[in-house]
Image (cartoon, helix red, strand yellow):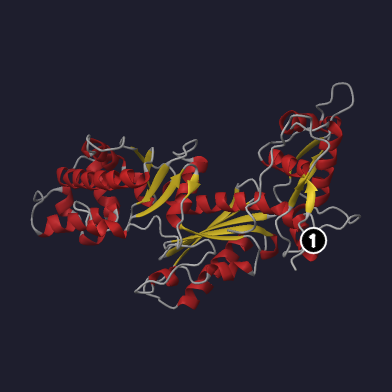
Amino acid sequence: MPPDPVARPASIDSLLAFAWDSAEFTATDAMAVVRLTRSTTIDAIDTLVRLGLLQELPNARETGDYRKGRPARRFELRADAGVLVGVDAGPQHITVTVADLRSRPLVTHRAMLDPDHAVVADRRDAIGATVDAALEAAGRGRAEVLAICAGVAAPVNARGISPSHPNGFWRQTNPGLAELFAAWTPVVRIENDASLAAIAEGSVGAAVGCGNYVTLLAGARLGAGVVVDGRVLRGAHGGVGEMVAFDHVAGVGSPIGLGHRAEQWAREAIESKEVAPGGALASMPADRIDGQAVLELARDGDADACRIVERLGRTLARIVSVLGSMFDPERVIVCGAISAGVVDVVAAARRALPTDLDLPAPQILASRLGADIVVRGAVAAAAEDARSTVLDRWMTAVPAGEPQPNGPGALEMVRRHARWDVPPFEMVEDPGIEPGKAPQVRIPRGGPV
């Protein structure tokens, strides 16, 4: 029989949610937002201090800001109580960001992979070693990881597992990462890379405040992160954002990305002598021709490159039209490394977008989050998971009477006592909530995604 749910006052969740979104604060500051009585607010704050999730700051008298009266106690989230880890595990590269609990990066570590190396175990070991190297560079260890999220170029189901694929690529790309990282922390999330791009855009990018949008990773291959009514769509096997359907769409023909198409079309134009002799594109060495180079030439006004950009715009318009009919988004955001030079392509797509669509055409935007959009989304996802699960774990972790955790060693002490098998908690009535006021509580999703 599973253990009984762990009960705690809703005031503790309310205070932690407030503190996570706030700078330093006093009990009075918190009361104005969470609508609790002073005694309940102070009790909740003291509990969070004992858990090591909040820290009390020096009072105004000690910092020289004191004027008269009794200085108010001031608190803030203990951002170094643990770390968040975001991973972008691409086919040829690994990017790892270690961040504090406020999602501020402590270090970003990068490594390159051999794209022809098909041994799944070796790829898994390389990803794990890169995360370890990032943690070491940040001066932290595995025991201090509060939550980890990794993005891969494959569909991923709710358990972090990718389905089989005829050529084995998806299982190679996601070589059991959920199992690998579960040995480090109980809060593990593996996601499709385009879905993490969607989370990044919704957190700090062009989709802030927007509940219906699609992010389009469009470099080597197309991949979409789809958000409908504020929720990232996944599907039974994680395949909502897979773009293989474009094999059957006239004017698109395949899920090849915009960057790859730009390179391919440039090489074809040079080979067929459709470019101006002596022009910038015709004169470019073959080993330097890639999508980004073509876009840069177009930005500098090269006529041959500009024609390729117009063609890319027509293709993007067709892609957006199909996505618009399928998901009815307000915005389609072109993102990833290609986004740095895709502004002209987006402008061309806007011009080419049909005016007789059944639904209103979505707005087409170029992302400003750059090549690290996936790892930024991974950190944001890890932060959300940490916020929604930390109290489930830590409320059972610090025995009464034990000295409170302190700084980077807090999580290690918590792990000595934590029950990782506890179920989602049960919210109990809190007499400290003012009558008629609902507490602001983040409801956990029932454990790791």
> Quadrant of the rendered structure where residue 329 is?
top left
**Which residue is at a point 27% across and 56% down the rendered structure image?**
246
> Quadrant of the rendered structure where residue 130 is?
bottom right
Give the x, y percent position of residue 54.
Answer: 77, 45
Q: Quadrant of the N terminus?
A: bottom right
Give the x, y percent position of residue 81.
Answer: 73, 52
Q: Horizontal placement of 41 versus 232: left or right? A: right
**Which residue is at a point 63% across and 60% down the rendered structure image?**
187
**Front one among 334 and 409:** 334
Q: Is residue 81 visible?
A: no
Whether residue 226 is situated above or below residue 360 in the rendered picture = below
- Which residue is situated farthest in the right direction here? 401
* Residue holding disc 1: 413
Whether residue 94 is situated above or below residue 379 in the rendered picture = below
Q: Quadrant of the C terminus?
A: bottom right
Three-letter code for the amino acid on which mark 1 is drawn: Met
Q: Is residue 351 visible?
A: yes
Give the x, y percent position of residue 180.
Answer: 58, 70
Q: Secondary structure at mark 1?
A: helix
**Which residue is at a point 58% across and 61% down the rendered structure image?**
134
**Front one among 279 and 22:** 22
How many numbered marks appear?
1
